[in-house]
Amino acid sequence: MDMSAGGRAALLSDHMLERSSCPGPSRHLGNQGSLLPGSRTPCKAGCLSPWLLGSGPSQDRLVWRGPVTLGFFPLVSWTGQFRVIGPGHPIRALVGDEAELPCHIYPGKNATGMEVGWYRPPFSRVVHLYRNGKDQDAEQAPEYRGRTELLKDTMGEGKVTLRIRNVRFSDEGGFTCFFRDHSYQEEAAMELRVEDPFYWINPSVLVLIAVLPVVLLQTAVGLLYLCLQHRLRGKLRAEIENLHRTFDPHFLRVPCWKVALFALVPVLGPLLALVICYNWLHRRLAGNPF
């Protein structure tokens, strides 16, 4: 049976679509099947056949309508962004000693042209500030002027360290390190713990230190007395009796409080001197000489 060229093309298209519901490369459409133009067989859900009937005046040919793949790549901005990393543990320092607070950026890069600084929350007191290639001492809080130093040896690698001299008890607490590159800024928090070199000395220990020499001295004197008494028993007793006979009667009427004071001075004197020495050292190391 004769048929026109258009009819043969339609039959050929139907035959190809029936053999493969979605041959060759496909492009996802969704969950619903689609009926192709010129075909009575729906394509499988989610795909489109690359073979379509030609459109236009000539319908007697097959035209390849393959899929065009468009790649979408995320745009990542690398405009100098970084992270600031501080020490992962509290920094410890003794009163009167030096403390070093390290801080660096990741990934490492030259930080000489950045603004770098440390401040203390919650009122953002400036501990140290580096800007325009030099230290800004005028912007420091009064209690840190002349006591801080920024170590810049490894600044070209993005690593800096803040050194605080003559550490005080008031320095204990949180610090924040920040790096600023133009309008981008990141920061990291850290903690400084200040310890007293005499933290192990408490009042009971001071009393023991003051009383122990006195007790040892009294014990030594007592042992010496017993030794002499054993060797010179007779002579010593005679001399003691003579001394008692020649004592001034007024000496025996000395008030009791004077006798007690005379006995306590050897004990309280070293204790008082030790307490005064401890307080003086404590105030000097704390940065307050008065």
Image (tube, rainbow, N blue to C red):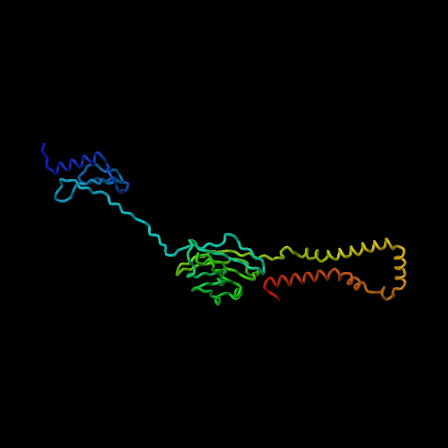
Position above or below: 30 against 129: above
The residue drawn where x is 49% and y is 66% is 137
The residue drawn where x is 78% and y is 55% is 220
Q: Position of residue 195 (x, y in %)?
A: 58, 57
Residue furthest out toward the bottom: 138
Q: Position of residue 158 (x, y in %)?
A: 44, 57
Count of marks placed on residues: 0
Position above or below: 42 against 75: above
Question: In this image, 136 relative to 253: left or right?
Answer: left
Q: Position of residue 260 (x, y in %)?
A: 78, 61
Position above or below: 16 against 248: above
Question: In this image, 74 relative to 105: left or right?
Answer: left
The residue drawn where x is 14% and y is 44% is 56
Residue furthest out toward the left: 2
Task: Quarter of the image for the C terminus: give it.
Answer: bottom right
The residue drawn where x is 24% and y is 40% is 48
Q: Position of residue 116 (x, y in %)?
A: 45, 61
Query: Foreground: 276 or 111?
Result: 111
Position above or below: 200 against 1: below
Residue furthest out toward the front: 153
Task: Quarter of the image for the N terminus: give it.
Answer: top left
Residue furthest out toward the top: 1
